[in-house]
Image (cartoon, helix red, strand yellow):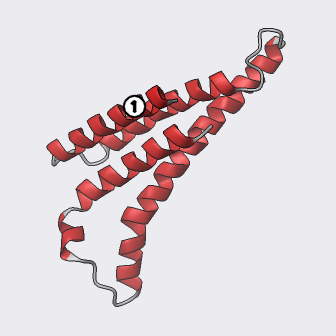
Amino acid sequence: PRNEALVNGVIALVCIAWALKSPYAQLQPVITAAIIFVIRLVQKLGRYGEASSPSASREEQSQASSKRLARGFLMTFGSLGMALILVKWLPNALAESTSFMLPRWYMLNITTITNVVPIAALFVAATLFR
């Protein structure tokens, strides 16, 4: 578990460094991190899965594998969607519907924030989910 968190942290830091280095990378680091963390979550769920015993039938193993894949996708893309809504959509919706003014630092760094916060959310989801 400690080694797993370290690997997830390195993956997240590489994607964040990519997002910070390239000012033109809109969501490529986030998409790459999402794909990697889906794979990591499916592997993690495979270790702790209910039908990972060799005595399970082929259908049970196939069904458990499908459930693991669905859980991995839901956890990864659910946390990605929540982070993007929190960072990108919600502030813009508040600014458009009310007289709320977005801070200058937010407007100047929206691309960086849109990349870093979802990658951090993916890291937390992949590391803490069991």
Residue found at the far top of this picture: 54
| Labels in figure, total | 1
Look at the picture and state if 5 lies above or below 65.
Answer: below
Query: What residue is drawn where x is 35% and y is 81%?
Result: 95
Q: Amino acid at mark 1?
A: Leu
Residue bearing the label numbered 1:
6
The image shows residue 119 at horizontal and vertical percentages of 37, 46
Q: Quadrant of the C terminus?
A: top right
Look at the picture and state if 1 lies above or below 83.
Answer: above
Look at the picture and state if 78 lies above or below 92.
Answer: above
> Quarter-wise, where is residue 107 in the image?
bottom left
Query: What residue is drawn where x is 17% and y is 66%?
Result: 108
Residue 126 as seen in the image, left or right of residue 68: left
Query: What residue is drawn where x is 15% and y is 48%?
Result: 23
Residue 104 as seen in the image, left or right of residue 46: left
Numbered disc 1: secondary structure: helix
Residue 64 as seen in the image, left or right of residue 102: right
The image shows residue 99 at horizontal and vertical percentages of 34, 90
Query: What residue is drawn where x is 81% and y is 20%?
Result: 60
Closest to the observer, 29 or 2: 2
Residue 122 as seen in the image, left or right of residue 59: left
> Quarter-wise, where is residue 48 in the image?
top right
> Quarter-wise, where is residue 123 in the image?
top left
